[in-house]
Amino acid sequence: MGSEFVAQYPEGGGVFWVPLQYLLGLRELGVDAWWLELLYGSGDAARDRARIAAFLAAADEMGVRERVVLVYFPENRREEPPGRRESFGLPLDELSARVKDGLLLNLANSVPAPLRAEFARTALLDLDPGPFQIWAREYDIGVGQHDAHLTIGVHLGAEDCPIPLDGVDWKRFWPPVHLPSWTTEEAPAPSAPYTTVTQWWTEQYAFLDGECFDCNKRTSYLANLAIPALAGVPIELAANIHPGERADRALLARHGWRLADPNVVAGTPARFRAYVQGSRGELGCVKPAYAKSRSGWLSDRTVCYLASGRPCVVEATGAEAHLPESAGLRTFREAAEAAAALREVECDWQAASRAARALAAEVCSSRVVLPEVLRASGG
């Protein structure tokens, strides 16, 4: 599969896991799978080299270095012509030979048209359902230019989902999780916090028929400030809130939110996993765009908590309509519902923990999801 959103963000330990779940899962199924990562020049050669080194070090740490290829474009040409390129992991001629009969799982349309033309078959895999389909009406983001179209928006097309599909035959899947990588560790103490790792600002918005679909998590968390006080359990937010945003930090603290630095607690894939598994569970608000669009988005982060036996309480997106009822995953629409769900989890945490792992195994395991992805991709 191909991505371009990992190497450019070396502090994002959780982001690294998104393609990694696919790579590990496909390899477990016996597929000759590779991870193709693209990095475009930033104009600062030293920064680019540091990012390359960090990415390759993370791949080595996670035991997949021999299955990762990073292609670097120093001249920052995403569109045709792609310009000069350097390869790390495979020589360029060997990479070109391999892709001629290969299937590309193009995560978030990371691989642009000039490069994906080299592949025998391509499947676009949408990771941002709702906003992605809206943006596709305005920008060239690959919709209609692939052999297959996949999405993790399992509720797209439903009556209560206002997102137009414009005739695209989207095949819907859950985000996969590689269960062997997410073992159920010893239960954390009751004093351990419910956590999540998140962006604060994206500065992204989508507009449909005059309606704004806000993609900033800040909006959702500020709308649910009362959760810690109502729930009576510790909640920690590892969000990249800029140190200068003192007002936001103070507001969260006054309402009982603990704050952690995501670059410290989750800055590598290994630290991200340790942070998830050291948590009591996940408390997660979603981008307002996901709640409003009812696209059925389920976080690639949440499935890591579930697989680790960590119960999750997350904001509703429509995904709940397609999931079996489970004590391991509860959804909410307002702060009072979230607090009540957290209290219910604490009534029998062990049962909720077992249910979380069972739900991950039944619904999101890469052994369940990826064979369907391959079939739908024509691979």
Image (cartoon, grey):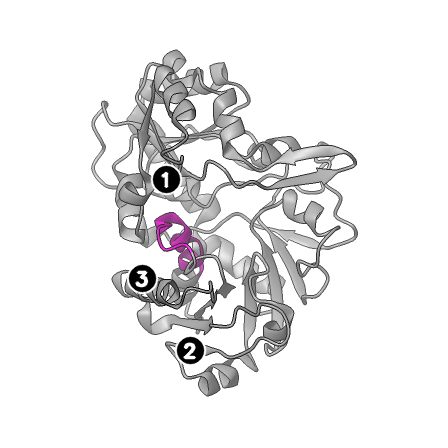
What residue sits right under mark 2 in the picture?
87
- Image height of 168 relative to 276, above or below: below
Magenta stretch contains residue 365: no
Question: Callout 2 environment at 10 Å: few (<14), some (14 to 19), or many (20+)?
Answer: some
Q: Position of residue 208 (x, y in %)?
A: 74, 38
Q: Position of residue 323 (x, y in %)?
A: 53, 36
Q: Is residue 288 left or right of residue 370?
A: right
- Point out which mark residue 54 bears: 3
Q: Position of residue 27 (x, y in %)?
A: 39, 67
Mark 3 or 1: the one toward you: 3
Mark 2 or 1: the one toward you: 2
Inter-mark Cα distance, 3 to 1: 25 Å
Magenta stretch contains residue 14: yes
Amino acid type assigned to the residue bearing label 2 in the image: Ser
Amino acid type assigned to the residue bearing label 3 in the image: Ala
Can residue 318 be seen? no
Question: Callout 3 environment at 10 Å: few (<14), some (14 to 19), or many (20+)?
Answer: some
Can residue 276 be seen? yes
Residue 210 lies in what quarter of the image?
Answer: top right
Residue span colored magenta: 9-22
- Point out which mark residue 305 bears: 1
Work out whether mark 3 precedes mark 1 in sequence or the reverse, and give the earlier one: 3
- Image height of 155 relative to 99, above or below: above
Work out whether mark 2 precedes mark 1 in sequence or the reverse, and give the earlier one: 2
Amino acid type assigned to the residue bearing label 1 in the image: Tyr
